[in-house]
Image (cartoon, rainbow, N blue to C red):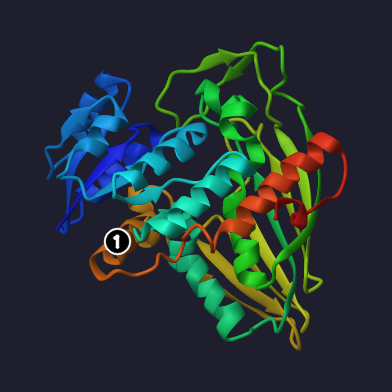
Amino acid sequence: MTNIAIIGIGDMGLGHLKGFDALENVRITAICDTNDASARKALGLLHNNKPRVYNNYRDVLKDTSVDAVVIAVPGYLHDEILLESIKADKHVLLEKPVAIDYERYKRVREAAEKSGKVIQIGLVYRYSRLYREIARKLNTERQLDDVTFAWCKEFRQCFPQEPWFYDKSKSGGTIVEKNCHHFDIFNWMIGSKPKRVYAIGGQHVYKKGHNCLIDCNYSLSPPRIINDISIIDHAVVAIEYENGAKANLNLCMYLRPMNVSGDGLEIGFIGTNGRQLIARRDEEYGIYGGNTADGVKYMLHPDEDGGKFGHIGCQRQRIEFLECIDKGLKPFANISDTEDALLIAFAAERSIEEDRVVEISEFK
């Protein structure tokens, strides 16, 4: 039995609270949030646990009954709390991004590598049945031969109406906060190291100095006016890999209320045999073309992929976190294996800011 504490009871923290509460081989010993009322309200969502409530994460880390912590706080606090958790000899499940800039990331990586503890990163697609099956089709069965082209189309509503999302100094920027997920999928399926990045982006709707109504429909908070916005609301990101493969991300963050077109998130790949694999809405993918013009489509309902407890893959992520602790295993999403995705995000933000091609080697 692993005793865990959840630090941060916002949108992501509540998902972890409900997900771990449904598992039998874990005890939620403590929860922590600076908003004491929110933390105590969250207790009413639990069916199998009665954790202690803290409002300072340092008190959680002093609790010797806690074996592991889940860190689900705003991005600018990730490195601080992770470093303190490692010092306190705790296992950690850390929400992405690992850190909001490269200097913070380097400190965290070094400490994690020396810790000997399980440090797992919340890149849930790595734990999704859908994307693990796609990886098997591409990397094991080589259905496309060599994957040489990839794309992601994410047209969605805005971030939740918490001011820190809209402050680049606290979130790292839209691409760092949002798209390391998608870059990690590119890296996973292409199987090569990213080499250089060029990105363009800006503010079309959510602009600095404008009184912008932020009304994300899955947020726990009421709509809010935010006018000090330093992040972008759209971008196009191009990536070149060492093996010559190319990938691009097309991002728009101002649909209202969300993407109702039916397309949803689209991620696709093309290989040297002329076939393509396209995944849509986190619930289906198809393989098309090649020597014939036909195609095969595979379906997997999000609820079958952990979606009952949040994003697809999230419940498998929690199960494997506990397995890694119990068996001394390396997480599938650890800091070193997910580094390149974060470097692409850092490079894209820098490319937009400085209007130039950014080499990944600049961060080495």
Residue in the picture at 58% in, 86% down: 141
Quadrant into which the N terminus falls: bottom left
| Place of residue 85 in the rendered image (x, y in percent of width and height, measured from the top left) | 34, 43
Going by the numbered disc 1, the residue's amino acid type is: Ile
Q: Residue shown at 84%/37% (left/top)?
A: 354
- Residue 281: image x %, image y %? 55, 55
The spot of residue 151 in percent (x, y) is 72, 59
Label 1 secondary element? helix
State whether residue 97 appears in this view: no
Can you identify the residue that label 1 sits on? 319
Locate residue 33 relative to residue 66 in the image: left or right.
right
118, above or below 82, in the image: below
- Badge 1 crowding class, 10 Å Cα cut-off, few under 14, some 14 to 19, many 20 or more, is some
Above or below, comparing residue 94 to residue 330 in the picture: above
Instruction: Residue at 22%, 28% (x, y): give it.
Output: 54
Question: 338 or 312: nearer the eye?
Answer: 338
